[in-house]
């Protein structure tokens, strides 16, 4: 599958853009485990053009993580165009426009999924950004604002007419937020439109290699995107890619191996952000990791993870987990 001249190979698996998750350290780790395309955290166009330091840091990318997409959002066309030009100077491979974020602080202001209530403005903004930069411009959005307004099939064609190079569709409406199940039948309807020729990337509820395979085979998407299932589990890309390539499950990854990956994630987060910010960033990943599912009385340990303030404290918690976990957990894969 190609996005303009960027060849992602057969059955591409992408890391979704996620706020406070997909920083450079996590992107690089997912890339090493097989992610074909990674996305930055979403970036406010308003904050970018005001040169907010925290926001400017999100533009930092490494050659090792290519191909990489930088994602921006906003509600004003001129601001988005100016921000897009700043993104181009950071030299990503792709510029992605976020028309899908459902959180109130974004959508209620008319940005992110809020644009689904203002389609003419969305199209105006998309066309203006496409004309302003030489990068491939892509869009990530949802099925519609709510069940009564599932507009994605027509919207996809109109976005294509604006010049975008690919479209990612999350199989929920904005009203659903992240509740219920993603409806991939609507993603399939987008792909089946005979007038649509750009690649379609499907997103929503892919948490196993088998489900990844099904999404390619049943819904005919060009690529898939994994988001929340990567929390505390960056090796999911290794599992998925192996299954897609061989049709077989990856041999069991030991508990100790996966625990070492989480230790590495801690170390790389701290190297990137410093100890205080790095710990704040990564400890939520650890607390959400499915690696610890099934461990008896894990609640107290999870609280310790969320309260840890130093690398030593966090490593000590993981050491205790390793000592106390049942032998069964140490041999079974997730």
Image (cartoon, rainbow, N blue to C red):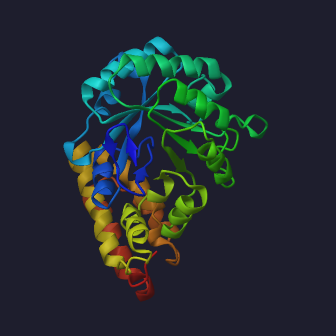
**Can I make out residue 182 in this image?**
no
Kindly identify the residue that appears in the image at 33 percent across and 28 percent down: 135
* Residue 3 in view in this figure: yes
19 lies above or below 207? above
Q: Nearer the viewer, residue 190 or 309?
A: 190
Rendered location of residue 140, percent (x, y): 51, 37
From the viewer's perspective, is 297 left or right of 90? right
Query: Going 41% across and 17% down the picture, which residue do you hit?
Result: 131
Q: Nearer the viewer, residue 282 or 140?
A: 140
Residue furthest front in the image: 194
- Quarter occupied by residue 320: bottom left
Q: On the picture, is 206 further left or further right than 136?
A: right
Q: Is residue 283 above or below residue 48?
A: below
- In the rendered image, residue 27, in percent from the top left (x then y), is placed at 32, 49
Q: Count of labels shown?
A: 0
Which residue: 60% across, 61% down?
Answer: 218
Q: Residue 134 in the image: state x and y as whole percent.
A: 32, 23
Q: Is residue 156 left or right of residue 38?
A: right
Task: Decide: is 89 above or below 36.
Answer: above
């Amino acid at each position: 599958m190609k996005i303009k001249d960027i060849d992602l190979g057969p059955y591409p698996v992408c890391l979704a853009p996620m706020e406070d998750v997909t920083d450079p350290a996590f992107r690089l780790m997912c890339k090493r485990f097989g992610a074909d395309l990674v996305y930055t955290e979403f970036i406010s166009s308003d904050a970018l053009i005001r040169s907010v330091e925290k926001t400017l840091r999100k533009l930092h990318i490494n050659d090792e993580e290519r191909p990489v997409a930088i994602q921006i959002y906003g509600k004003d066309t001129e601001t988005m165009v100016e921000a897009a030009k700043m993104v181009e100077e950071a030299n990503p491979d792709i510029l992605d426009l976020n028309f899908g974020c459902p959180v109130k602080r974004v959508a209620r202001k008319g940005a992110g999924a809020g644009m689904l209530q203002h389609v003419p403005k969305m199209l105006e903004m998309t066309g203006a950004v496409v004309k302003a930069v030489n990068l491939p411009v892509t869009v990530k959005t949802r099925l519609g604002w709510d069940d009564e307004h599932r507009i994605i099939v027509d919207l996809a064609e109109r976005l294509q007419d604006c010049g975008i190079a690919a479209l990612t569709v999350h199989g929920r409406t904005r009203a659903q937020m992240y509740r219920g199940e993603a409806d991939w039948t609507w993603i399939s309807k987008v792909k089946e439109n005979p007038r649509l020729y750009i690649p379609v990337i499907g997103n929503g509820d892919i948490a196993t290699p088998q489900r990844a395979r099904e999404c390619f085979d049943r819904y005919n998407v060009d690529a898939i995107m994994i988001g929340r299932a990567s929390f505390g589990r960056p090796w999911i890309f290794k599992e998925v890619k192996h299954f897609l390539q061989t049709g077989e499950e990856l041999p069991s990854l030991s508990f100790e191996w996966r625990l070492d990956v989480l230790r590495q994630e801690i170390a790389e987060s701290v190297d990137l952000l410093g100890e205080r910010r790095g710990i704040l960033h990564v400890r939520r990943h650890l607390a959400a990791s499915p690696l610890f599912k099934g461990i008896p009385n894990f609640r107290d340990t999870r609280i310790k993870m969320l309260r840890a303030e130093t690398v030593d404290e966090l490593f000590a918690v993981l050491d205790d987990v390793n000592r106390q976990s049942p032998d069964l957990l140490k041999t079974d894969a997730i």
